Image (spheres, rainbow, N blue to C red):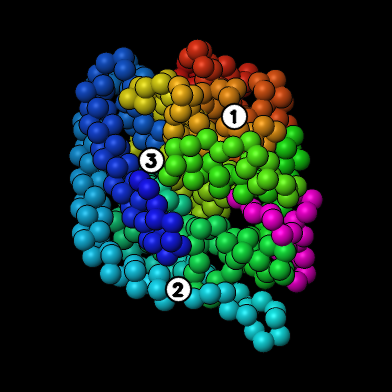
Amino acid sequence: MKMNNFRNLKKFNLNIFRKLRFSALLLTCSAVLAACGSAAQSDNLPTIHLQFDESAQSAISPETADISQEISQEIAEISQESAEISQEIADDLTDLTDVEVQQLAQMPQMIEPANGGDVPLRQIQPQVTPNPPNITTPRNPADYSRFNTTFIDLFDTVTILIGYAQNQAEFNHFANDVIRPELLRLHRLFDIHNEYPGLNNMRTVNQNAGVRPVVVDQIIIDLLKLSIDAYEQTNGAVDITLGAVIDLWRDAIQNTQTVPSAAALQAAARVRGVEQIVIDERARTVYIPAGMQLDTGGIAKGFAVETAAQLAESAGFAAFTLSVGGDVRVTAGPMSGNRDVWGVGVQNPSNTAEILDAIFITHNSVFSSGDYQRFFEADGVRYHHIIDPQTLQPARNFRATTIIHPNGAIADILATATFILDLETAKQVVSNLGGQALWILHDGSIITTDGYSQYGSNR
């Protein structure tokens, strides 16, 4: 889809593009889930990089017949929900144009006090109900049922929450009063593309490069400090200061389908280096030099998922799996009585209707990176969105990588780093940070760390 060159229409078209992408992804999920039913009693696993406790494991286990009914029910529930959400998107799109154009026309610029300082941050706080109704003291697993819901307005992707609660009201509380508000808060704070009235976010920091320090929420400082550590721990593979370079590739993938010139990439990378990010924790400000743009895309989603999951656990949500764009964080195992672990499928990058392995975990995260998610091809060469800071080109060592780590933020960092680094360096980085990894090579062969087997389907 070509974006209009005018600034306002470009933003408007991008919003349309994202909504349509949501709809397409939901339709894909529905089709994959339908395939799950036909594969349930064969040796083929359903292909989906999401979490489904019963279905993912049953597809591997010889005892699939025992839970085929559960799979069918799951397919019906998720497919119905996907259809309803798709209809909501269609309804929204019919009313979108006038509303969005008006909003864009009225979008405020960054407000600056007369003294030239920053506007005090109006924080978006998670709205957690202290004592939600209809939630009683936890009892035995037989008192819990399985529920699920889907969100489409977070981190430009589909979020699926599956969990066990004593009733629908309890599940709705954890989903709508705890997890979604926190993810939405972090989505807005970490957003580099959009402004929000009264909020200083990562876009505000980029807009003020070389101008002034920006007062930010403490969690942005925490994210940036982790990003600086990530740069050091990954031998520079994860570099958030390459935002200008990533912008060129993003435009190429989404719009022009043209490879950026070497001169343009070098010019975009002229101002880089995490050592140039100035953080004043006492004043709670961030400053970057002129010419630098930050892009925390390789960290922000994992950071947000981990933060929301920990908040939900502390609120009393014990057994759930949270998938944001297919990257998964799980807590305690399912309470169905059939099994005590969650299953997460690993897609085949050459055929996304096929699953290569299933990972069985509790209190863990599974994050993946690959060249098959966002890309274009020119002269027979695939150009994707994961950029090697050394070459300023898409990384070429692997087709895909998958990481297992207890912390979603670290899993996200490692998923990016292990896709970019050479195999031996990547293995060392994974070991240093306490994770496990799987690499899919260009010839289709698979390499794993030594400890991966305890989680994989052949464990």
Q: Horizontal and vertical percent for residue 366?
A: 51, 35
- Alpha carbon of mark 3 to alpha carbon of mark 1: how far? 41 Å
The numbered mark at residue 395 is 1
Task: Mark 3 and mark 1 in contact? Answer it, CB < 8 Å.
Answer: no
Asked if residue 198 lies left or right of residue 227, the reply is: left
Q: Which is more N-terminal, label 1 or label 2?
A: 2
Q: Secondary structure at mark 3?
A: loop
Q: Is residue 407 above or below residue 381?
A: below
The magenta segment is 274-295
Q: Quarter of the image holding residue 448? A: top right
Question: Which residue is the extreme one toward the bottom?
Answer: 114
Q: Which residue is mark 2?
A: 107
- Alpha carbon of mark 2 to alpha carbon of mark 1: how far? 37 Å
Q: Which is more N-terminal, label 3 or label 2?
A: 2
The numbered mark at residue 335 is 3
- Alpha carbon of mark 2 to alpha carbon of mark 3: how far? 47 Å
Q: Horizontal and vertical percent for residue 244?
A: 62, 49
User: Which is more foreground, mark 2 or mark 3?
Assistant: 2
- Residue 109 versus residue 170: which sits nearer the camera? 109
Q: Is residue 250 above or below residue 423?
A: below
- Please say whether residue 277 is one of the residues in the magenta stretch: yes
Task: Mark 2 and mark 3 in contact? Answer it, CB < 8 Å.
Answer: no
Asked if residue 84 lies left or right of residue 402, the reply is: left
Q: Horizontal and vertical percent for residue 311?
A: 53, 57
- Residue 246 versus residue 216: which sits nearer the camera? 246
Residue 179, can we see it? no
- Residue 207 versus residue 411: which sits nearer the camera? 207
User: Which is more foreground, mark 3 or mark 1?
Assistant: 1
Q: Quarter of the image holding residue 107? A: bottom left
